[in-house]
Amino acid sequence: MPAQTSAGLGLRRSLLDALQAAPAGAFDFLECAPDNWIGVGGSLGEALSALSQRHPLSCHGLSLSLGGPAPLDVEFLARTRRFLDQHQVALYSEHLSWCTDDGHLYELLPLPFTAEAVQHVAARIRQAQDILGRRIAVENASYYAVPAADMDEADFINAVLDEADCDLLLDVNNVYVNAVNHGYDARAFLARLPSQRIASYHVAGHHDEAEDLKIDTHGMPVKGDVWALLADAYTMHGVRPTLLERDFNFPPLPELLEELTRIRQLQQAAHG
C-alpha cells in the first residue's frame, strides 16, 4: 500500500522508458488501469512486472461499469483479482459511473442521483468486492448533465458509500470541474464527504472552455485553483496517497516530477 504521505504517477505506455530510467525516489507509487494490462506479455509485460517489483502499484479501473444496466462481467473481475494478487495491489478503484450496455461505450457516463440508483450501484459494488476479495474505492466522476435527481451529488455519493460499505477515491479536479459547471461551492462539497472513507486522492489538469465550463481532460498541468482545493482537502480530511493523472500531451518527465513536488509540499504543509 502506498504510504499516506506519498505522490504517484500514472503508469502509461508512453512513459514506460522514462519511468524505468527515473532516479530512486522520483515518485512514491505508480497507478495503472488493469483493463489495459491484463494478458499483456512480451517487453511491455516485462516492463510492468519490473516496475511493480520496484514500486508500490495501485490500480484504477476503466471498464467495470459499476452503474451500468448490463450484468457485471464476473470473468473480467476474476481476471482482475488475479492481476491485483500477482502485483500485490492493495488499492483498487473504479468510477462511480457506467460505460457499457450491449457493448463498451468508451465514455464514462453519469448516474442519476436517485435512491433507486443508490441501491443498484451499491449492490454491484458489493458483488465486485466479493469477487475481488477486497474493499474497493469508487471515484466521484465529472459530469456535464444529470439524468435524474431526487438528491444532490454529495448526498448521492455518501449514500452509495454507506450502502455499499466501500471507500472513496476523491478526485479533486472532478470536484472543481463539477462545482464550476453546476454552480456549487467546491469547499462546501468537500466538507460533506466522509473523511474515514477516503482512501486516496487524484489531481489532474482540465481545459478551460469558458469561465463557466471546464472540461475534465487529464491532458494539461494542474491549475492553481485545483492545487488550492487539494490543500483544502488535506486540511479537512487528512493526507492520503495522491496521484497525478496525465493521459496525453505528456511533457518531459522532469515537468511531471515538478508537479509531484507540489503534491509533496502540500502534504508536508498539512502535516506541519
Image (spheres, rainbow, N blue to C red):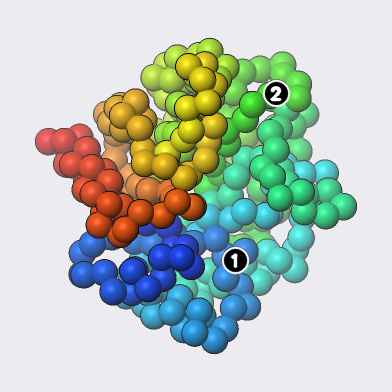
Residue 229 in percent (x, y) is at: 34, 27
Q: Residues within 10 Å of mark 1 (few under 14, many from 20)?
A: few
Residue 176 or residue 79, whichever sits in front: 176
* Residue 123 visible somewhere in the drawing: no
Residue 261 visible in the shown view: yes
- Using the rendered view, name the quadrant where residue 236 is placed: top left
Residue at 48% x, 33% y: name it. 207
Q: CA–CA distance between discs 1 and 2?
A: 29 Å
| Residue in view at x 22 percent, y 38 percent | 266
Identified by mark 2, the residue type is Val
Which residue position holds label 2? 146
* Residue drawn at (76%, 21%) of the image: 148
Q: Quadrant of the C terminus?
A: top left
Quarter where residue 152 is shown: top right
Q: To which residue does mark 1 refer?
A: 36
Using residue 149 as the reference point, say whether residue 220 is left or right of it.
left
Q: Residue furthest right?
A: 102
Estimate the x, y position of residue 187 in percent, counting from the top left.
39, 19
In the image, residue 21 above or below residue 196: below
Q: Secondary structure at mark 1?
A: helix
Residue at the image position 60 percent from the left and 66 percent from the top: 36
Q: Nearer the viewer, residue 110 or 17?
A: 17
Judge whether 20 appears above or below 14 on screen.
Answer: below
Percent coordinates x, y for residue 53 in the rendering: 36, 77
Which type of secondary structure does the marked residue at label 2 adopt? loop
Of residues 14 and 158, the one nearer the viewer is 14
Is 32 on the left-hand or right-hand side of 133?
Answer: left
